[in-house]
Image: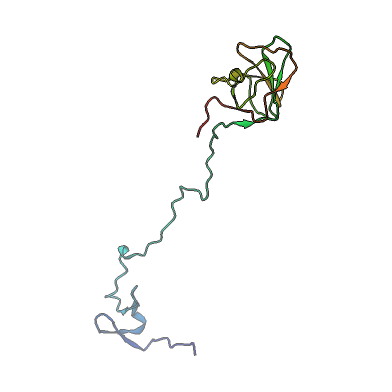
Amino acid sequence: MGRFATGKNAYGISDRSGMKYRYRDLKKEWNGSLVGPDEFESKHPQLGPFRTVADPEAIRDARPSRTENPVEVLLVLDPFISSAASSGVITVREFGHGRSTTDTVRFRSVNGFDGFTKAVLEQSSGYSITVVTTDTYTFTANGETATIGGIVGGGSRATAGPTTVSA
C-alpha cells in the first residue's frame, strides 16, 4: 500500500469535457477537477480568500502620557508656623511638596491662629510662595501680622492646592 503506478500507459477522462487524455498529462485545477492541458484554467485572482494583514498603526494596551490635574493636598496637623511678632511671613510644613518658588497656592479649611484670621489665610487668589526646603515653604499674609510669633497653628483639616480645583 502507499505505492501507485506511474501511469505511463494509463489514460484518464477530463472532468470538464469528458475527452480522453494520457493520465500523466492531466492537470488538477484549483477546484479539484482533473482536466486536459488545453482545458486548464488557473484560479482567478478575485476568487480569494485573501490573507488579511493587521494594520501596524496601533500598539496593544497603549498608555499615553498625560498630565494630571492639580489637586488639593491635606496638610499635617497645624501646618503653619508664624514668624517673629509683627511679621506677616508664615512658614508652611508640607512634606515632599514638589512645589517651586513663585507657585501660587491656595489654602482651604484653615483655622485662624496668632493674629491671622481664617479669611486672610483662605484668600481666594492664593499666595505666591518661596520654597525653603523640600518640606517647607513660606508666604506673606496680606494685611495681617503675627501677634506673638513662633506659634504653630492652622488646624487639623487644612489643605493646600491650586487656586481652582478641577472636578
Report the front residue among 31 and 79: 79
Q: Position of residue 91 (x, y in %)?
A: 70, 20
* Quadrant of res 73: top right
What's the residue at 27%, 75% (across, down)?
39
Q: Specify the farthest residue to the top.
A: 86
Task: Say above or below: 114 vs 155.
Answer: above
What's the residue at 51%, 51% (across, down)?
60
Question: Can I make out residue 36 in this image?
Answer: yes
* Quadrant of res 48: bottom left
Q: Is residue 105 left or right of residue 17?
A: right
Report the front residue among 30 and 63: 63
Q: Position of residue 26 (x, y in %)?
A: 33, 80
Report the front residue among 50 and 119: 119
Task: Say above or below: 28 vs 144.
Answer: below
Q: Specify the farthest residue to the right.
A: 150
Q: Is residue 10 left or right of residue 136?
A: left
Q: Specify the farthest residue to the bottom.
A: 1
The colour scheme of the drawn protein is rainbow
Task: Say above or below: 162 vs 88.
Answer: below
* Quadrant of res 47: bottom left
Question: Can I make out residue 134 in this image?
Answer: no
Q: Position of residue 61 (x, y in %)?
A: 53, 49
What's the residue at 45%, 87% (across, down)?
4
Report the front residue among 53 and 101: 101
Q: Position of residue 28 (x, y in %)?
A: 35, 77
Q: Number of numbered discs present?
A: 0
